[in-house]
Image (cartoon, coloured by chain):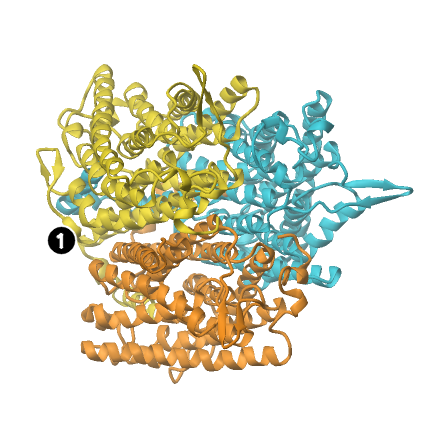
Chain colours: A cyan, B yellow, C orange
């Protein structure tokens, strides 16, 4: 039937072509078609990033937790898709109440093709924010608790700060610029991950008190090829993530610019993380290098459209150094147990990338797409970027403190001691690894 | 050379643009270009589903059979591509003889760009139908037998029922609607898998007679992360599978609608399968949840264009419950050994999704693209959908009974006892796992 | 912000549509948009091939080397991206000096959207050439040496021979045709791999002298499912690799032709390699069959646009036989240790595919896009193809002899004996496998 219809359409075009297209509407439809296939394909690429996160998290943790982790990854997208359809989209992209929160379009009420299209691209971004959290909380979180916090983050926490920035909210009005989500997506996930990791506490045996000192034990991942596969999938999906965010949609000539800066920042991040670990530890560290590539990608996400190739290399390089320092700082100094480095990659490097927009960004381009408060000086732009970073940090820390605090209070956050180590949560699911 | 040519084309456009495009043909070419890049990219995504099936099947079976399984997956696509080029396409999309079978275009004779394009999209769908079978017949089928039945399914069995539905055959004429292949692709694979599993018999040690009872042994998969990766790849590829089937090709504004209903049904399927297994078995089961996502995807495939988001959630949710019940029914009651649940996911949920078109589908949309017999009442549409499900079931069961019966009679179906367990068919290939 | 802007654009189109599009420029912009999204998506697909190479190489070698191999794959793309941005692109696509080498556009100086777009597609092709080498040199190469030779190949060696063929250089002017890179990309990688493998020497224990004979030990890979996943990823990415090279960009009606010949050659290659190994060794060999699929893909790459489906089946089939013979010849006769068969797949079958353009290619199509010397007879075309194969072979062998020779002389090529086997280079990185 499909093919018959295509033939029919083809015939109609052939016979009535001049009539069919001799309308002003047609060229709009062409623009619409570009946006449609571009955003749906970009959304598919970003969806595939779920597989990347699942492989990175599985590879960098212990084999016994593999079933549990991939189950969480599958379910947080599933739960998240329904939650973002019912509530999340409305709070993020519904009609604004004072630039603070969206108020309509629940269950995509009144949706047309353009809204379904935009929802498809947004739901996969929202799922990324939620999935980031599971990495930092791996190997000790209750499954039911995971489902609940993922639901709340996608339905409420992520959309509200997203509204401030991507739906003309108060931060957008001040001229804050975050092209594809260093702050909107990655930092939100990273800060939620941080609060979750702190309230959960470390995995058993990770930090052992020895007299007045605390011995930090490295808990190695079990499958580097899977982790590397995950990194390649994430990098691949990032072309959808960043280039899909093009302001002019599928006809934007800057799609190539965005893809170029994304590539260079990722490469620079991997290289600098490798050298940093090489100099510091005496050997190039694979998991640090992989996190360096991701750090470069997270870092360039906010400024990929306004930062030029040289700037992108610098942003990525700084992110590559930063992620190694940050992972060590959270682990060795703060003793916050983050098995995959999610806080550093997404939280810290997301903040760095957002700030970098102010430092390296083309102010004219920023002003062109900016809100009422656009047209800032460089100092002003840096200030607004810092304000946005701080506001989102505060929002996420406060709301997730409440969220994880309630889950902890009712005993839904952490698995029992007997469920953890060496079999940990797998026992919750009775599944083979 | 490539780049030079592009520059040349660019120059030609710049200099002679008005002439070059000032023809009526041009806007048709634009429509054609959208269809081309859309269908080829969708075909690439669907091709990638072969990797998804390979990973799901490998992950859910024993390590010793891994080499054998992935070899089968690689070869059935390879054999299938040549078979669908030589014969399959002709029987499916050649000029119809009485709405029953295509009769020309063998070896793509007389093909133009549009036909190559449609072939590329159709060959990857055909390969999906054949690959489904290998999952249910895993761990005990002879390699040569596998090659032969894959060849016959892709070259003959699949194309003929496909002709009835997608090339204006007798079912299409009656108003039967299957947008992207719940029946055309998935049920064909699922029912062939069922007949194959029955004629093969169960794996050694799977059902053990103990007095008057039969003890059912669970044979666990060996690699959940690989299986999960496979599910994510399949879900990713499904955006090509469903949205690629758009009636208006690459300019169809309903591409976003299709992607949305696909996403929601998959999520609902995973969630409901998880809860069903949680309630029934006391623990959320990862492999059931994964099959739930696939069940939701298979279920929405027929109606993805005519069922709205709320309907999609219901279709997916029912599929998620159904797949758990069905897997248990085939295993515990019928004692048909299906290592990966392919019969339930593709056969049963394919039938459910096809019926759901009648229950939840927009009758106006169905009539718009329907055949002579379109414009049915709801009861009539449900009846026609049921008729189509039954007709394809009968066709596949009868033809594969003959096919697998002959293979069994000549000893080409099942490996020797000594080749099975614990090393089974690996010995056939002398390969490391 | 993104969504708001899209709405704004939508509004502008709605209100001012006729004005906005009532310019001659618009239809050029449509052509430009097709080229943009087509090439960027194709580039993303080719980028993903990095994951394919990483999985194939990891799966076909020993578990102890997995961390090291995937680290090399990640870093050679990262280093390569910066190198091709700084130098490689300029030498390949800069203004030609006598048809021998490009001379400007270092660091993409003066780039516009079209140049960023072309760079994105070219950088991922360049990275493929470099990554091929790591497979043949696996399990015994120093990490620092790997970084250095990858850098030089992408920055200097690959771009110069590429310039001869794809930027109107002397071979292009003679009418040499290599559509998507059987020679430009694959043979360059394959011949560099050969020289590297020879200068490195074999892995410890691979060839053991026993009296006057040399015993050849098979060193088995450790993970066939990962290797198979890699092959599927490569095949998937090849649709971007070959179809992305379309001369008319995203509006080329021959995109479907290219996808069809690519599919058929790959299938024929897998089938014939399977049968060859079956007849020769008594069992169908999975890794040979996988290499057969890749051999078919490499083989059709040069002629995918000028060879018809029947020719594509022949080209793929010959490549499938050839790769089995060649792997055995290099291993058993020449005693060159190539753990994954990269020399045979990419070098030998790349040369075969390039020659096949002369034998099976449509001379009219070749002449249409050819240089000054185009319009050759069949004998002439075969001669020019052979000349190009030889010239690139000579260029790569000489330059990489110097490159690897220097690395060997300064002790940067091969790991110490104590670092190799059974833990080999992993010790260099202190990382879990």
- Residue projecting furthest to the front: C211
* Residue C324 seen in render: yes
Q: Residue at x 73, y 37 (%)?
A: A203
Q: Position of residue B250 (x, y in %)?
A: 30, 44
Q: Position of residue A433 (x, y in %)?
A: 57, 36
- Residue projecting furthest to the left: B98
Chain ID, mark 1? B
- Residue projecting furthest to the bottom: C98
Answer above or below: position of A273 versus B310: below
Q: Position of residue A183 (x, y in %)?
A: 61, 44
Q: Residue B294 versus residue A358: which sits nearer the camera? A: B294
Q: Secondary structure at mark 1?
A: loop
Q: Residue at x 45, y 42 (%)?
A: B65
Q: Residue at x 60, y 78 (%)?
A: C408
Q: Residue A380 versus residue A37: which sits nearer the camera? A: A37
Left of C190 or right of it: where is A188?
A: right
Answer above or below: position of C246 versus B292: below
* Total marks in image: 1
Q: Quadrant of residue B142?
A: top left
Answer above or below: position of C19 versus A196: below
Q: Residues within 10 Å of mark 1 (few under 14, many from 20)?
A: few
Q: Position of residue B237 (x, y in %)?
A: 39, 42
Left of A102 or right of it: where is B164?
A: left
Identify the residue position indicated by label 1 in the image.
B110
- Residue projecting furthest to the right: A212
Q: Residue C182 versus residue B395: which sits nearer the camera? A: B395
* Residue C8 seen in render: no
């Amino acid at each position: 039937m499909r093919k018959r219809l295509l033939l029919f359409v083809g015939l109609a075009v052939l016979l009535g072509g001049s009539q069919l297209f001799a309308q002003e509407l047609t060229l709009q439809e062409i623009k619409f078609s570009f946006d449609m296939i571009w955003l749906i394909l970009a959304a598919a690429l970003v969806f595939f990033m779920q597989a990347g996160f699942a492989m990175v998290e599985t590879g960098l943790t212990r084999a016994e937790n593999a079933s549990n982790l991939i189950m969480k990854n599958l379910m947080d997208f599933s739960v998240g898709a329904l939650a973002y359809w019912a509530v999340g989209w409305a709070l993020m992209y519904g009609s604004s109440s004072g630039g603070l929160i969206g108020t309509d379009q629940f269950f995509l009420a009144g949706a047309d093709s353009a809204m379904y299209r935009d929802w498809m691209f947004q739901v996969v971004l929202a799922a990324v924010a939620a999935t980031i959290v599971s990495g930092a909380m791996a190997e000790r979180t209750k499954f039911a608790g995971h489902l609940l916090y993922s639901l709340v983050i996608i339905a409420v926490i992520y959309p509200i700060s997203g509204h401030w920035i991507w739906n003309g909210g108060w931060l957008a009005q001040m001229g804050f610029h975050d092209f594809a989500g260093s702050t909107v997506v990655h930092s939100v996930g990273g800060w939620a991950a941080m609060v979750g990791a702190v309230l959960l506490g470390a995995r058993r045996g990770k930090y052992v008190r020895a007299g007045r000192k605390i011995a930090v034990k490295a808990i190695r991942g079990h499958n580097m090829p899977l982790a590397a596969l995950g990194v390649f999938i994430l990098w691949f999906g990032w072309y959808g993530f960043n280039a899909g965010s093009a302001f002019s949609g599928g006809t934007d000539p800057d799609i190539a610019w965005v893809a170029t800066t994304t590539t260079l920042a990722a490469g620079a991040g991997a290289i600098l993380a490798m050298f940093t670990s090489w100099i510091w530890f005496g050997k190039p560290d694979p998991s640090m290098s992989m996190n360096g590539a991701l750090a470069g990608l997270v870092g360039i996400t906010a400024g990929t459209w306004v930062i030029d190739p040289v700037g992108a290399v610098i942003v990525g390089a700084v992110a590559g150094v930063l992620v190694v320092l940050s992972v060590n700082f959270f682990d060795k100094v703060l003793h916050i147990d983050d098995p995959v480095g999610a806080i550093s990659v997404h939280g810290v490097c997301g903040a760095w990338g957002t700030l970098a927009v102010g430092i390296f960004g083309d102010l004219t381009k920023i002003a062109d797409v900016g809100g009422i408060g656009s047209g800032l000086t460089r100092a002003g732009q840096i200030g607004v970027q810092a304000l946005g970073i701080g506001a989102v940090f505060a929002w996420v820390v406060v709301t997730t403190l409440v969220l994880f605090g309630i889950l902890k209070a009712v005993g839904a956050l952490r698995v029992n001691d007997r469920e953890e180590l060496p079999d940990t949560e797998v026992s919750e699911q009775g599944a083979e690894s």
